Amino acid sequence: MLTSAFRSPAAARWWTLLLTFAALALLFASEALAHNVAEGDKGYIQESSGVLLLPFIYLGAKHMVTGYDHLLFLFGVIFFLYRMKDIGLYVTLFAVGHSTTLLFGVLTGISANAYVIDAIIGLSVVYKALDNLGAFQRWFGVQPNTKVATLVFGFFHGFGLATKIIEFDISKDGLIPNLLAFNVGVEIGQLLALTAILIIMGFWRRTPGFIRHAFTANVILMTAGFVLVGYQLTGFLSA
């Protein structure tokens, strides 16, 4: 679908400029990338005790709406999905994966290096962009199972957040209800973010230039993923 865009000099010039802008924007926004949590929210989580459903729903929704990694991945997942049935299926797979490892990680105390997990999450964005560009078919003659990939990367996204929450040493008093509330908030935030993305995509898809600029958008998406990976690996090596 996007093969012709590779041969367009105009598209090449545009995506080169946009890639530079996207990379710089992400670098300047590095404090907000991945699973960083605002200092005020971090302090609240650490000091909270007892069942606090509404505050944790809010924190979960805020995390999803402001989470660059989640939004980039979701944008890539729905980029070429037109039917609500398909969008619902893929978003549900991502939500199941995200929720499972978030709850499992926090309740069991199992964690991993946050930088490594977030680097893998950056790779999930790169994967989805390459998939949208048809790179796997063109380079290797195979097409990864997109449903399985969405579920698996959902696991990593949830585990990344679980690792961060474990670092906060959240109180055991009211832990399970608060975690469930946080998870509900994440899903609410995901619906809000998804609604905004679908509205924008809906207008864009009705323009004559959508297919022509789809290549550009996915190369930018891929570059953003690589910036996320580079940022996290730099943090890992300098920690």
Image (spheres, rainbow, N blue to C red):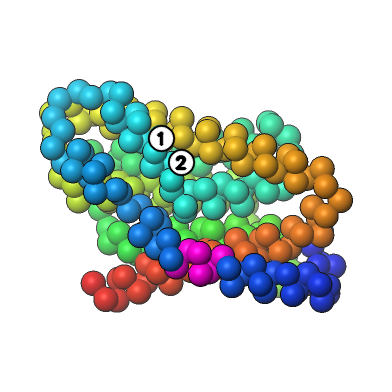
User: Which residue is found at the position 46% from the left and 41% from the top?
Assistant: 65
Disc marking residue 65: 2
Disc marking residue 49: none
User: Which residue is found at the position 67% from the left and 42% from the top?
Assistant: 200
Instruction: State if disc 2 and disc 1 touch (CB < 8 Å).
Output: yes
Near mark 1 (Cα within 10 A), the count class, few <14, some 14-19 or many ≥20, is many
Lateral position of residue 40 relative to residue 232, left or right: left
The image shows residue 175, relative to residue 162, as above or below, that is above
Three-letter residue code for mark 1:
Ala
Along the line of sight, the residue nearer the viewer: 41 or 92: 41
The magenta stretch spans residue 23: yes
User: Which residue is found at the position 81% from the left and 67% from the top?
Assistant: 5
Q: State the CA–CA distance, disc 1 to disc 2.
A: 6 Å
Lateral position of residue 158 relative to residue 15, left or right: left
User: Which residue is found at the position 44% from the left and 68% from the top?
Assistant: 27
Residue beneath label 1, please? 61
Q: Which residues fall within the magenta stretch?
A: 22-27
Dividing the picture into quadrants, the one containing residue 130 is: bottom right
Q: Is residue 197 visible?
A: yes
Lateral position of residue 63 relative to residue 77, left or right: left
Three-letter residue code for mark 2:
Val
Dividing the picture into quadrants, the one containing residue 177 is: top left
The magenta stretch spans residue 132: no
- Pinpoint residue 226: horizontal percent, then vertical percent: 51, 69
Near mark 2 (Cα within 10 A), the count class, few <14, some 14-19 or many ≥20, is many
- Could you tell me which secondary element the residue under label 2 belongs to? helix
Count of marks overlaid on the render? 2
